Amino acid sequence: PPSRPSAPPAADPRGAVSVHEAGGAGDDDQRSSAVRVWGGRTIPGGEARREPAGDCGCIVQGTIEVRSSRPLADPLRVRVSVEQHPALADTVELFMGSPRPFMLRGLPCGQHRLNVEILSRRRFRVTSPEALGLFDCSSGALHHPRIVLEPR
């Protein structure tokens, strides 16, 4: 039988997951188990199986801001979510100052589109439509949208 590596190699610098068989030749009496490497950390096979099916590790890490000639009178809450998976969401509170970050983790692989919901009676429009366009999510991918809002 082909030999198996006795230790997993270093993790992919992008944070991708590598799965390897643990154990080597001559250990037929021991059960071999999968070893998963994620971001430089080794995770035993049993723990790795608890990851949700379809989770490919894609991350959306972006910013959202208001562009206006007048400052916001009150804080503005905005919810950013994945259109096809509304449970994958982050809520940001905008007020005075620089753009605010948001992060969405664990997107399934494939093409996605972001959705922006203003949690206020005030009306805003997205002036950066490219940030809400389709993007491709592949294992280890990092997407950086910049969402800009303007009052209507």
Image (tube, rainbow, N blue to C red):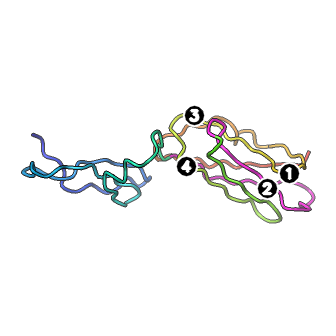
Q: Nearer the viewer, mark 2 or mark 3?
A: 2
User: Upstream in the sequence, badge 4 or badge 3?
Assistant: 4
Q: Which residue is mark 2?
A: 77
User: Upstream in the sequence, badge 1 or badge 2?
Assistant: 2
Q: Which mark is residue 59?
A: 4
Q: Provide the secondary structure element on which disc 3 rests.
A: strand
Position in image of residue 105 (x %, y %): 56, 50
Picture layout, residue 47 above or below residue 3: below
Q: What range is drawn magenta here?
A: 58-85
Looking at the picture, which amino acid does disc 1 mark?
Ser
Looking at the picture, which amino acid does disc 2 mark?
Arg
- Judging depth in this view, the residue of 109 and 46 nearest the camera is 46
Specify the quadrant that holds the N terminus: top left
Q: Which mark is residue 111?
A: 3
- The CA span between labels 3 and 1 is 29 Å
> Is there a contact, CB below 8 Å, between mark 1 and mark 2?
yes
